[in-house]
Image: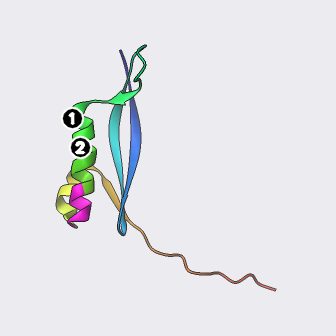
Amino acid sequence: MRKRRQTKMIHEGDYVAKVEVEMLETDEGWSPYLSLDDAKKLDDVREALRRRDLKTATRLARIYTLQPVGSVTPAG
């Protein structure tokens, strides 16, 4: 079994979380996959963002806010 680090992005409301997880690779048909702990970590981050519990979310991931850019009219 091989392990490799990967960043997963979760979008909830006005927030985006970058969550570091380990992908497990085997020669079997369902590869690559997450460990049960990393799958739970993704769920925990998503739930924390839904509740707007940024304290919990930031313990598990890097959290960013989204802001609309707005419409830009071309010069000319």
The picture places residue 7, in percent across and down from the top left corner, at 40, 42
Q: Looking at the picture, which amino acid does disc 1 mark?
A: Asp
71 to 53, vertically: above or below = below
- Residue that appears at 45% across and 74% down: 67
> Left or right of 57: which side holds 1?
right
The quadrant in which the N terminus is found is top left
> Left or right of 60: which side holds 17?
right
Which residue is denoted by mark 2 in the rendering? Answer: 41
**Label 2 packing within 10 angstroms: few (<14), some (14-19), many (20+):** some
Residue 49 lies in the magenta stretch: yes
The picture places residue 42, in percent across and down from the top left corner, at 28, 46
Which residue is denoted by mark 1 in the rendering? Answer: 37
Q: To which quarter of the image does residue 14 belong?
A: bottom left
Going by the picture, which residue comes out furthest to the right?
76
Element assignment for label 1: helix
In the image, the segment drawn in magenta is: 47-51
Q: To which quarter of the image does residue 35 belong?
A: top left
For the residue pair 3 and 11, the one nearer the viewer reads as: 11
76 to 56, vertically: above or below = below
The picture places residue 38, in percent across and down from the top left corner, at 26, 37
Q: Are marks 1 and 2 in contact (CB under 8 Å)?
A: yes
Residue 44 lies in the magenta stretch: no
Please tell me the numbered disc located at residue 51.
none
Label count reads 2
Element assignment for label 2: helix
Q: Looking at the picture, which amino acid does disc 2 mark?
A: Lys
For the residue pair 5 and 41, the one nearer the viewer reads as: 41
Question: Overall secondary structure of the magenta stretch?
Answer: helix
Q: CA distance from mark 1 to mark 2?
A: 6 Å
For the residue pair 66 and 36, the one nearer the viewer reads as: 36
The quadrant in which the C terminus is found is bottom right
